[in-house]
Image: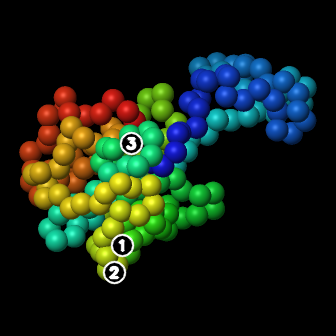
Amino acid sequence: MHTHPPQAQGDDAAYSFCPKCGAALVSRQLKTGDPERRVCSACRFVFFLDPKVATGCIAELRQGIILLRRSIEPGYGRWVFPGGYVDRGERVEDAAVREMEEESRLRVQLTSLLGVYSYVGRPVVVIVYTGTVVDGRLEAADESLEAACFVPDRIPWNELAFSSTWDALADYASGRHGVQRPDPATRPKVF
């Protein structure tokens, strides 16, 4: 992912004022069993802290999985597959193709949905596709220090940036190539 994720649902300090009337937001439980929500103290507007959707694509070139070494935080210097946030109103599939081209200069055709990755207490939902390269030349482009291709049994598991990167690559390498799932101790603690 490209930027710091939005605040988690329970982070009351993230938003203080109502976007409709400007009055103070307060935390209230609206229904039994629901978490507390940010509610306007004047107009009763409920400010839902919705999840942020990110997408990515795992594709191969020259029999290697395309990975990029990040040039930004979080995860500076660590490896990821091309991906990023979905813009409001953008199809998730189109965002995956766009991110691949922006970050690696490769155009892909999506072939399947690999998986959807979400984590307790984290606001980002990551939707990962597989794809086939149809045009372009691999290079480290937007937000990357380096671009490389790794054969599935040589993925740098202990140098991956995020848990979602590790989980998706483990699913891909074990499912597509029969590679034994990596040691869970190599899984990053960053989501």
Numbered circle sitting on residue 135: 2
Amino acid residing under circle 2: Asp
In the rendered structure, the answer to whether residue 48 lies left or right of residue 57 reads right
Residue under label 1: 106
Q: Earlier in the sequence, mark 1 or mark 3?
A: 3
Helix, strand or loop at label 1? It is: strand
Amino acid residing under circle 1: Leu
* Residue 14 seen by the camera: yes
Q: x, y (%) of residue 85?
A: 52, 53
Amino acid residing under circle 3: Tyr
Q: Residue at x 21, y 37 (%)?
A: 158
Mark 2 in CB contact with mark 1 (< 8 angstroms): yes
* Residue 184 location, quadrant: top left
* Residue 18 location, quadrant: top right
Task: Please state which of the two labelled residues, at mark 1 or mark 3, is closer to the viewer.
Answer: 3
Q: Is residue 12 above or below residue 184?
A: above
Q: Residue at x 52, y 39 (%)?
A: 4
Q: Residue at x 14, y 42 (%)?
A: 181
* Residue 129 seen by the camera: no
Residue under label 3: 76
Task: Name the residue furthest bottom.
Answer: 135
Q: Residue at x 48, y 32 (%)?
A: 122
